[in-house]
Image: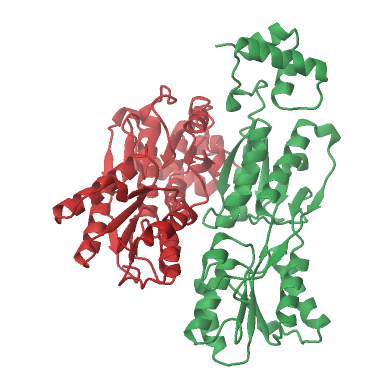
Chain colours: A green, B red
Amino acid sequence: MPTVKDVARRAGVSVATVSRVLNNSNRVSDKTRQKVLKAIEELGFKPNLLARNFRKDKSNLILVILPTVANVYFARVVKGIEDAARKRGYGILLCTTGNSPEIACEYLKLIERKQVDGAIIASARIDSETIFDLDQKKIVQACEFYPFLDTSCVLIDHKKAFFEIVDYLIKKGKKNILCAIGNEGIPSEEERKEGYRQALEENGLEFSEENVIRCRYGWADIYERLKVLICSGKYDAIACSSDLMAVGAIKAAKESLLKIPDEFAVTGFDNIMISRIYEPSITTVAQPMYEIGEKAAEILIDSLENPDGFSKQKIILPHEIKTRESA
Amino acid sequence: MPTVKDVARRAGVSVATVSRVLNNSNRVSDKTRQKVLKAIEELGFKPNLLARNFRKDKSNLILVILPTVANVYFARVVKGIEDAARKRGYGILLCTTGNSPEIACEYLKLIERKQVDGAIIASARIDSETIFDLDQKKIVQACEFYPFLDTSCVLIDHKKAFFEIVDYLIKKGKKNILCAIGNEGIPSEEERKEGYRQALEENGLEFSEENVIRCRYGWADIYERLKVLICSGKYDAIACSSDLMAVGAIKAAKESLLKIPDEFAVTGFDNIMISRIYEPSITTVAQPMYEIGEKAAEILIDSLENPDGFSKQKIILPHEIKTRESA
């Protein structure tokens, strides 16, 4: 089997140059690139993705830090990362933290240990007390942005997205709208709550802290809470911070024999598969999950391969309101 | 901050012994263990999970190879692995292959490269042509067993499980039962098909290859196929190889205005959350997903820490039929 060295010898270039061509680096002239590609073809050289670590301190692996893999939302983000990484010759490894900032920190140490070249923190919870001195060039935050960690990030405008979906409910005639969001300390959840408040206030409705339900992302927690609240007859809609929460809210409304959406409207967030296949189908905010992952991988690899040219980026991708049967 | 060396010095033992205590190895006497634990307490030593690689060739990381993270089925398996691994002082890294045997092989090379200590292949497709010479002691197969890879494994009896659910349909009076399973070349799918055949034959019904629909695990493929088949009026039930397939089948039956389960019954497989929350709720086979992951991690770590005592194990865990509204 021909090796990278054979290719380098045949093309009359250095091993590093062959590496740059294999990694699609743009620091190679077209002429050189052609020479290398010709040598690869003539020798029948097959580059092996994970064997491409020519330098000992390069693993060609990117770590993706997730809170959990139990949410299919992340599956699309991961697919985007994976496809973009593979195009550039990188494999990816995932780890999950159960939202423990301490576990996130432990896994981030794999960068120092050269087990991975860099990391994408995708929604996993971190905090300013456990986070240690990290090389910002080797980390990108995706979906969520913790400002105390001074890195590039790729996400949507959570406040604007939640504003728009609550505004949509109001335009549909809803006046007593609950808001179900995740627990405190997660930046996107606070942004969404702010979007909810603004939408009410701009439409002349009153914001009240007691209409904000803090709950878990799954369907069961909000289902139990809403079964009680709904009895009051005070509310005509709920804007939820995940599609699974919306499923729980719909279940509670159905059990109270409320007509959806006329008597009680429900919206979700994320646009995961269940929002399309559930009955009624769920009006939700579509996050460009694949694109968030793709873009995060691209900017991370750019800065890993060209650290001198690094400049921090904050990339906001567009979201979209998907109107369906539930609101 | 006190280090492992400090603990060893204080306890009057070697660093390797401290390591064994931290890793819950049973190759340490109780007396020595007490000495080490006392030194740890006195010094206020905090062992860091991922920093516990005292030997250069030990990463304290286990790789989990999955086809995808888009199926929540795997989330439970991963949680079981994670919990069991953490108890023994290991972190886990996940990788996904999109069911490409070549990609599975690339990731398995991380064992040779000492990036991980061992791997659990959880349902990811592998084939005898791409698989290279692997140390069977460092790999466990979970959920699925490819016999050409001579390792320990943890899974359910797929044939028996599918037999039971088809037998259940027959006992409910169904006579013309379709079977929807995954593509060829996956051992569990062939086992399930065999279970379907046996259940029909033992109940005096005829097995016909044309009633076996090969399709993707998601809901859309079977939905399209069944919409056409159902028009014939020939069938009164379908046994599906995943819960998402069952969702697709229910959608197709509903659109044809068939009453579920009286006119058309549907069963799923796995018992993922959607089988409980979908309407109608889905009769399915519950796999002990968490326990499969937990057990796989335990036997892998046992053989990593005590390779001389290695003996190959095939562990079959019990499944359970969950009867709900769809059949």
Return the residue found at the far front.
B232
Is the N terminus of chain A in the top left, top right, bottom left or bottom right quadrant?
A: top right
Q: Nearer the viewer, residue B316 or B254?
A: B254
Q: Nearer the viewer, residue B57 or B153?
A: B153
The spot of residue B257 in percent (x, y) is 41, 72
The spot of residue B114 in percent (x, y) is 52, 28
The residue positioned 33% from the left and 43% from the top of the image is B188
> Toward which corner of the image does residue A166 lie, by quadrant?
bottom right
Q: Is residue B252 above or below residue B63?
A: below
Q: Nearer the viewer, residue A199 or B40?
A: A199
Q: Is residue B203 above or below residue B150?
A: below
The residue positioned 33% from the left and 67% from the top of the image is B264
The spot of residue B243 in percent (x, y) is 41, 58
Q: Nearer the viewer, residue B73 or B275?
A: B275
The spot of residue A91 in percent (x, y) is 60, 34
Q: Is residue B80 above or below residue A195?
A: above
Decide if residue B157 is in sight here: no
Is the C terminus of chain A in the top left, top right, bottom left or bottom right quadrant?
A: bottom right
Q: Is residue B199 above or below residue B252?
A: above
Q: Is residue A137 left or right of residue B81?
A: right
- In the rendered picture of this protein, how many numbered marks are placed on residues? 0
The residue positioned 65% from the left and 68% from the top of the image is A284
Decide if residue B274 is in sight here: yes
